[in-house]
Image (cartoon, grey):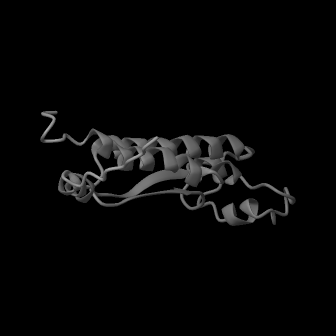
Amino acid sequence: MTLGFEWDTRCADLELRRLRDGFTAYDHLNFGRILFENFARTQADVHVITDSLRQSGRADVTRSTRRRWEGQIIYGGFSSGVKNPVRYAVAELFGRSPSYGGDHDYMKATRFIDEELIGPVSSFISRGRNTPHPERGN
């Protein structure tokens, strides 16, 4: 039995150009989808008495370019609820609330967001398998 491997670098320049061109609108949509799905989970975990803490929450895409994407989930600050601005978001998050005490980590639903982003990032990287090969005519 004979085994052999050949490393074809003829299309390396095409693949490097694709990676250099960066994220597409499809990639940005996937990153945003993960962010907003996680935000919805945090909204479900926030307790509601005055609704101020929940209404102070927001998810924002803070940077979206061909080479970089950043998003954040924030609680506190402006709220259209009874308490405005919400200054107790951190106390609630870390369980130091005089009213609730204990563990009230409304951000715990986001603890696996890094793993969830692996899918869209892998999709971007592995899309190179579809880079047209000039000798195959595709």
Residue shown at 81% from the left, 66% from the top: 96
Q: Nearer the viewer, residue 29 or 9?
A: 9
Q: Is residue 122 above or below residue 96?
A: above
Residue 17's image quarter? bottom left
Instruction: Give the left or right position of residue 108, taking residue 121 as reference.
Output: right
Which residue is farthest front? Answer: 1
Q: Nearer the viewer, residue 64 or 100?
A: 64
Please say whether residue 48 is visible from this viewpoint.
yes
Q: Is residue 65 above or below residue 124?
A: below
Q: Where in the figure is residue 66, as x and y percent of width and height?
A: 27, 56
Instruction: Give the left or right position of residue 40, taking residue 70 as reference.
Output: right
Q: Where in the figure is residue 122, as x and y percent of width and height?
A: 44, 48
Q: Nearer the viewer, residue 60 or 17?
A: 17
Q: Where in the figure is residue 7, as x and y percent of width and height?
A: 30, 53
Instruction: Give the left or right position of residue 127, taking residue 81 as reference.
Output: left
Residue shown at 30% from the left, 60% from the top: 67
Instruction: Give the left or right position of residue 66, taking residue 119 as reference.
Output: left
Residue shown at 67% from the left, 40% from the top: 44
Q: Count numbered badges in the picture.
A: 0
Residue 134's image quarter? top left
Please say whether residue 35 is visible from this viewpoint.
no
